[in-house]
Image (cartoon, grey):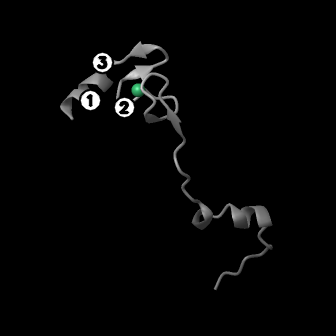
Amino acid sequence: MAVPKRKMSRSNTRARRSQWKTTAANLTSCPSCKADKLAHTACPSCGAYNGRQYAEALRTVNEL
Ligand SMILES: [Zn+2]
């Protein structure tokens, strides 16, 4: 059976795929409607992004 030739570094041990964890998404509040939204995306409830309105977000809201 194959045996590792060298000791694995602490860095490589800690970077092993089994140590990969997910982190919670960063939520910010919309400046126009104060709802929670993902950073750097249009607001899902009002469609505002950087002072503009986005029709696709508005259509999604109208379907609900
Ligand atoms: Zn909003």
Residue at position x 73%, y 63% in the image: 12
Give how far across and how far down residue 60 sits, in percent. Answer: 26, 30
Dot 3 corresponds to which residue?
55
Horizontal and vertical percent for residue 45?
34, 30
Kind of element beneath mark 3: helix
**Labelled pair 3, 2 in contact (Cβ < 8 Å):** no
Q: Earlier in the sequence, mark 3 or mark 2?
A: 2
Q: Is residue 13 left or right of residue 46?
A: right
Under 8 Å from ligand 1: the CB of mark 3?
A: no
Q: Which residue is mark 2?
A: 44
Residue topped by disc 1? 61
Residue 15, by quadrant, is bottom right
Q: Secondary structure at mark 1?
A: helix
Is ligand 1 closer than 8 angstroms to the Cβ of mark 2? yes
| Amino acid type of the residue that numbered disc 2 sits on in the rendered structure | Pro
Residue at x-position 77% and y-position 70% = 8
Foreground label between 3 and 2: 2
Q: Residue 64 location, x and y as percent?
A: 21, 35
- Disc 3 to disc 2, C-alpha distance: 11 Å
Locate residue 14 relative to residue 26 in the image: left or right.
right
Question: Alpha carbon of mark 1 to alpha carbon of mark 3: how far?
Answer: 10 Å
Graded by Cα atoms within 10 Å as few (under 14), some (14 to 19) or many (20 or more), the crowding at tag 2 reads: some
**Mark 1 or 3 closer to N-term?**
3
For label 2, the SS is: loop
| Total count of labels | 3
Q: Residue at image x 70%, y 81%?
A: 3
| Disc 1 + disc 2, Cβ < 8 Å | yes
